[in-house]
Image (spheres, coloured by chain):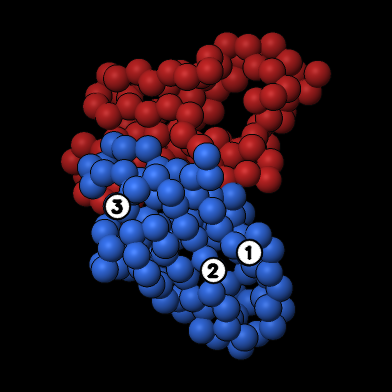
Amino acid sequence: GDSVTQMEGPVTLSEEAFLTINCTYTATGYPSLFWYVQYPGEGLQLLLKATKADDKGSNKGFEATYRKETTSFHLEKGSVQVSDSAVYFCALSKAAGNKLTFGGGTRVLVKP
Amino acid sequence: NAGVTQTPKFQVLKTGQSMTLQCAQDMNHNSMYWYRQDPGMGLRLIYYSASEGTTDKGEVPNGYNVSRLNKREFSLRLESAAPSQTSVYFCASSGRDGWNTEAFFGQGTRLTVV
């Protein structure tokens, strides 16, 4: 079946450091790819998405590019802030009905 | 601006007790979902409903039942709670049947079964 693998955390960074979270997927066909973010005590919210190969999703300084040749969708941000401390989930959706398959989540802690 | 509302936020059950988690959305979405979140495993789909009156099993449906009461509400029932059902439960909704639309999540219900 479909699956998503992302790097385990926690990832601890200093403010203004570069962040990258690796995500790879296994799926037949052409999934859509997502990054969701979960701030402490809250539900998940969409951070960015890409629906076809070579698409780049971006939002709030975060970027990720859909790489079909490497089945990857790595998340990057050039300069993190304390407010970026959260858990980040990579996910894919393939079937009608928008059912999501999630990775295990990566906790990011940004220190001042 | 409520979005997806879940109740309760916290619950402690004894093994064998039953309970219903409530979920309501005010975005006129057709599709609704129940996920459980466990450490290191991300979120896993329990059940989903593509439209009012229809429900289907997800990845981990055993021990759960659901009801799509109307377009707004989608409840999850544990008939006989087990410690393995200790988890954080999230309800979500999305607006179209396609596979590239945003899902909106509630704040979650933290359930502990002792």
Can residue B60 be seen here? The reply is no
Residue A101, placed above or below residue B22:
above
In this view, the residue in front, B24 or A59, is B24
Q: Amino acid at mark 2?
A: Leu
Q: Mark 3: give few (<14), some (14-19) or many (20+) Cα within 10 Å.
A: some
A112 sits left or right of B96 in the view = right
Q: CA distance from mark 1 to mark 2?
A: 7 Å
Picture quadrant of residue A66: top left
**Residue at image point 69% right, 41% down:** A40
Residue A110 is situated, as x and y percent measured from the top left of the image, at 73, 25
**Chain ID for label 2?**
B
State the residue lying farthest toward the bottom.
Answer: B16
Q: Mark 1: give few (<14), some (14-19) or many (20+) Cα within 10 Å.
A: some
Q: What's the mark number on residue B8?
A: 1
Q: Secondary structure at mark 3?
A: loop
**Residue at image point 18% right, 41% down:** A29
Q: What's the mark number on residue B21?
A: 2
Point out the tag, 3 or 2, that comes first from the N-terminus: 2
**Chain ID for label 1?**
B
